[in-house]
């Protein structure tokens, strides 16, 4: 006696989507920190130039300034990696990912749960800055832990509706983060345009590529490093897995799997927005982007991705009624944090 | 590891006889433990604890604002039950559950047992978990107690007694399953040469039980869900564990909605019909329209849908009428009345304080008795006479006089003990045993159960909320089946 498998609960879809986003977010913060640590060795700058941009991307520049003042390496890493009051810190992201995973333990595989839990416990015991000689390794391990989660997910969980919701979350988050790192580095590099063609310029752009693990793949495709090629690679590439276009292509495939709508058509608002964005990335050249202003372009891109996130919520009732229960008062507010700061929180 | 000078302390020990000689069924296990190097058992124990944390097998500690999770302490030395004894336990439990189910069905229908003068009506009506809203309901197949976790204890006399029936929302079965996995992972050598009956089929049997009670008229595979109060509930791990092992959705009240007297769940593709709900929420919180109006955990209209036969609930609401500790005292009479048999597993002798004669006896012997509130669980609302102060006894005497219906008393039992790792040596600790009984098309008992152990030296309280832990329970295969 085999019946139809019911579709995913809306609440579960929401939780797996956010679980994936938070893990991807944690990974990206670890990337930002890691690449800056590297860059600092090659090209030491004043803290305002070296570490402040990381705070600027996080969208919490005001809070940070009030609490810590000058953006020194130690303060910035504490804030971005371990501070529990920063809802986008690695520690917070992993806690939120785990809370979400815990609420859908029956949906994901045991291996996935164990991996999230292990990462959470690790950062819980770490809690503060590692020794200098352990620093790079510590953030590499977090990155690898997140990769392991992605691999375990692909290898142990059926590529079913829940899996597609996870991929949607992961890919939208990744596209958002790639666009942000590009935006901030480009902005930061503008004053040094006089350095174009110098080794310094190379170091900077290499750092941008390395922060998304794209340096080697870029080299194979373009050879010499030029700003417009880097933009082309990180935004328009259809094969590199952290390029915006690749991410949106994957996200749109997953959305299609969820809805069952044939390619080239739409039934939901989210499908329409996703399709439009995908087409735009498919048919735009990098010259147009740079001519119209990279910063403005990336800004619009992020707004479009936020709109997709919002429409997903409406289309699949992805956010259900607020959680209320007698027992939850004992962990007051936790539920709102589980579904905490969204990608909509424009940085 | 040296196991010499082990002291049974005058209690029945599950591993050693009164002369401190190993019981035959424990000999092999004991040899294995003796062959271990110094500190090896402790290292296995520590490994087990690490695994529990890593797997997140924890319960939530109430009253802790940080939402603290702790692993339920686990002791590596298993409790062994012989094939012969298990056979007797299984027959006894089946008999008891069958009678209890008949009793509940009778109470909500003809009340023959009251009319025939076996049980006084006022005792039934005053039972805290009697639900007049359930009168006349006909659950599928007439089953009211689908999942039961009966607590058994062995007294110093060597006899096993039923201590509590736990018919409402029994928990702990996930620990029975996880403890076995943990044993295999950390201490595999102890299984050598022994035939321990597996427990892993429990989730399949549970799913079968739940599918068997689908509403009448459902011809396709029924949609079964597990309803949890949410992830801040102390038993949340078990809820998600069972849902995962059965492959069914884990839902919260807010995921469900009642329309047209049917229950639906909110999915990404709209509403989908639900047929069977394994609910892990107490009656009171199930449906604000029928029970407690202030409950935010449940589903408005759920009981109406249930009454209309459009959805099945396990366990059936109202079955707690038989969970009252006063009603417990009548279970042997129920077995005689409905089954026409003598009870196989005896009750602990119980004094009912609403009877004048019993109350006099209880009040005069408080220092030797255990007094329990009729409707409390988890080791709360209890006076352990021999461990009590005069002031505590006075307080209980006042409560008993004021509300005799609410109190029962039993002789203090010398719960049997099992060797347990304490520091670097083994010491006896008191245990009970909770087997799990499933009732769908038929009554089935998984060979095993949750052995709870009072880890504090001398303590008789095995509840996890009060310093209890658990052990793996080994039911041995019968010799002729090896």
Image (cartoon, grey):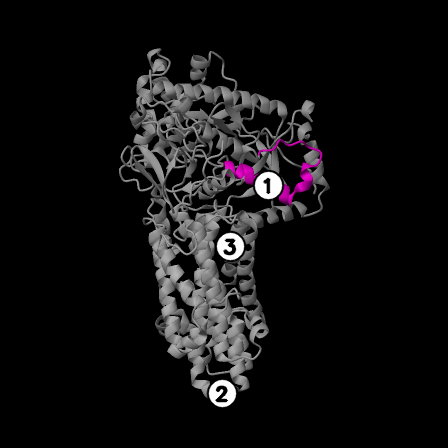
Q: Which residues are magenta?
A: B173-199
Q: Residue A195: give its label.
A: 2
- The percent position of residue A36, horizontal first and vertical second, equals 50, 75
Q: Circles 1 and 3: CB distance less than 8 Å?
A: no
Using the image, name the chain to which the residue with label 3 belongs.
A
Mark number for residue B440? Answer: none
Q: Which residue is mark 3?
A: A116
Question: What residue would you read off at disc 1?
Answer: B181
Q: Residue at x 43, y 15 (%)?
A: B333
Q: Secondary structure at mark 3?
A: helix
Q: Position of residue A117 (x, y in %)?
A: 51, 53
Q: Nearer the viewer, residue B180 or B393?
A: B180
How far across and how far down the image is residue B132, in percent? 29, 25
In the displayed structure, A234 sits above or below B391; it is below
Give the letter of the chain under mark 2.
Answer: A
**Crowd around label 3: few <14 · some 14–19 · many ≥20 (10 Å):** many
For the question of whether residue B169 can be seen, the reply is yes
Q: Same chain for labels 2 and 3? Say yes or no.
A: yes
| Front in this rendered view, residue A264 or A274 | A264
Measured along the vertical axis of the image, is residue B399 above or below residue A147? above
In this orientation, which residue lies closer to the viewer: A137 or B435? Answer: A137
Badge 1 marks a residue whose secondary structure is helix
Q: Report how far apart the C-alphas of labels 2 and 1 lie in the structure.
A: 63 Å
Tag nearer the camera, 1 or 3:
3
């Amino acid at each position: 006696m085999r019946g139809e498998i019911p579709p995913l609960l809306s609440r579960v879809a929401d939780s797996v989507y956010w679980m994936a986003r938070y893990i991807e977010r944690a990974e990206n913060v670890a990337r930002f920190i890691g690449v800056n640590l590297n860059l600092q060795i090659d090209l030491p700058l004043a803290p305002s130039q070296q570490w402040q941009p990381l705070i600027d991307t996080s969208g919490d520049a005001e809070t940070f300034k009030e609490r810590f003042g000058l953006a020194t390496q130690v303060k910035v890493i504490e804030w971005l990696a371990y501070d529990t009051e920063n809802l986008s810190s690695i520690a917070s992201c992993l806690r939120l990912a785990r809370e979400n995973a815990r609420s859908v333990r029956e949906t994901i595989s045991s291996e996935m749960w164990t991996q999230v839990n292990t990462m959470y416990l690790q950062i819980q015991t770490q809690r503060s800055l590692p020794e200098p000689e352990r620093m790079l390794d510590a953030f590499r391990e977090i990155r690898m832990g997140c990769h392991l989660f992605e691999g375990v997910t692909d290898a142990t969980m059926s590529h079913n509706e829940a899996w597609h919701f996870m991929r949607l979350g992961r890919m939208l988050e990744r596209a958002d983060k790639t666009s942000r790192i590009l935006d901030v580095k480009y902005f930061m590099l503008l004053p040094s345009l006089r350095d174009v063609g110098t080794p310094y310029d190379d170091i900077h752009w290499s750092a941008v590529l390395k922060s998304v693990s794209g340096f080697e793949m870029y080299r194979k495709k373009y050879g010499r490093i030029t700003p417009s090629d880097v933009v082309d690679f990180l935004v328009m590439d259809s094969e590199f897995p952290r390029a915006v276009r690749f991410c949106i292509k994957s996200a749109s495939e997953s959305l299609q799997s969820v809805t069952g709508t044939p390619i080239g058509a739409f039934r939901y608002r989210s499908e329409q927005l996703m399709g439009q964005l995908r087409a735009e990335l498919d048919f735009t050249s990098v010259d147009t982007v740079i001519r119209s202003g990279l910063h403005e372009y990336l800004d619009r891109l992020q707004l479009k991705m936020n709109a997709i996130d919002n429409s997903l919520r409406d289309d699949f009732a992805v956010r259900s009624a607020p959680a209320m229960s007698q027992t939850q008062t004992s962990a007051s507010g936790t539920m709102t944090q589980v579904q905490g700061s969204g990608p909509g929180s424009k940085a | 590891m040296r196991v010499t000078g082990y002291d049974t302390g005058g209690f029945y020990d599950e591993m050693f006889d009164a002369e401190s000689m190993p019981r035959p069924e424990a000999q092999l296990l004991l040899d294995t433990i003796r062959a271990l190097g110094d500190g090896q058992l402790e290292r296995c124990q520590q490994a087990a604890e690490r695994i529990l944390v890593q797997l997140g097998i924890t319960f939530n500690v109430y009253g802790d604002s940080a939402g603290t999770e702790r692993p339920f302490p686990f002791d590596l030395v298993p409790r062994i039950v012989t094939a012969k004894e298990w056979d007797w336990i299984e027959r006894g439990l089946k008999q008891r559950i069958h009678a209890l189910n008949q009793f509940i069905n009778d109470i909500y229908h003809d009340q023959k047992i009251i009319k025939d003068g076996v049980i006084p009506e006022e005792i039934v009506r005053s039972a805290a978990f009697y639900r007049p809203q359930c009168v006349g309901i006909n659950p599928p197949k007439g089953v009211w107690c689908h999942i039961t976790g009966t607590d058994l204890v062995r007294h110093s006399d060597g006899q096993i007694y039923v201590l509590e029936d736990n018919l409402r929302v029994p928990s702990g079965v996930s620990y029975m399953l996880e403890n076995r996995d943990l044993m295999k992972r950390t201490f595999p050598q102890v299984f050598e040469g022994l035939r321990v009956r597996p427990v892993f089929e429990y989730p399949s049997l549970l799913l079968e039980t739940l599918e068997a009670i689908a509403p009448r008229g459902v011809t396709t595979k029924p949609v079964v869900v597990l309803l949890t109060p949410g992830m801040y509930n102390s038993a949340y791990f078990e809820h998600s564990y069972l849902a995962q092992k059965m492959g069914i959705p884990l839902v919260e009240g807010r995921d469900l909605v009642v329309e047209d007297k049917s229950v639906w769940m909110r999915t990404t593709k709209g509403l989908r019909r639900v047929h069977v709900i394994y609910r892990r929420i107490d009656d009171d919180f199930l449906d604000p329209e029928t029970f407690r109006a202030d409950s935010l955990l449940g589903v408005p209209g759920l009981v109406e849908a249930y009454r209309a036969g459009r959805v099945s609930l396990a366990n059936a609401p109202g079955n707690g009428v038989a969970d009252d500790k006063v009603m417990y005292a009548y279970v042997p009479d129920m077995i005689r009345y409905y089954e026409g048999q003598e009870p196989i597993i005896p009750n602990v002798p119980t004094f009912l304080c609403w009877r004048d004669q019993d109350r006099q006896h209880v009040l005069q012997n408080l220092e030797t008795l255990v007094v329990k509130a009729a409707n409390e669980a988890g080791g709360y609302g209890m006076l352990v006479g021999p461990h009590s102060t005069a002031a505590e006894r006075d307080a209980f005497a006042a409560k008993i006089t004021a509300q005799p219906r609410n109190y029962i008393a039993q002789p203090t039992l010398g719960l049997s003990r099992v060797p347990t790792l304490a520091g670097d040596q083994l010491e006896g600790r008191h245990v009970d045993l909770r087997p799990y009984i499933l009732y769908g098309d038929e009554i089935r008992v998984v060979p095993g159960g949750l052995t709870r152990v009072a880890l504090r030296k001398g303590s008789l309280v095995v509840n996890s909320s009060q310093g209890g832990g658990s052990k793996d329970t080994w039911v041995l295969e019968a010799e002729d089946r090896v």
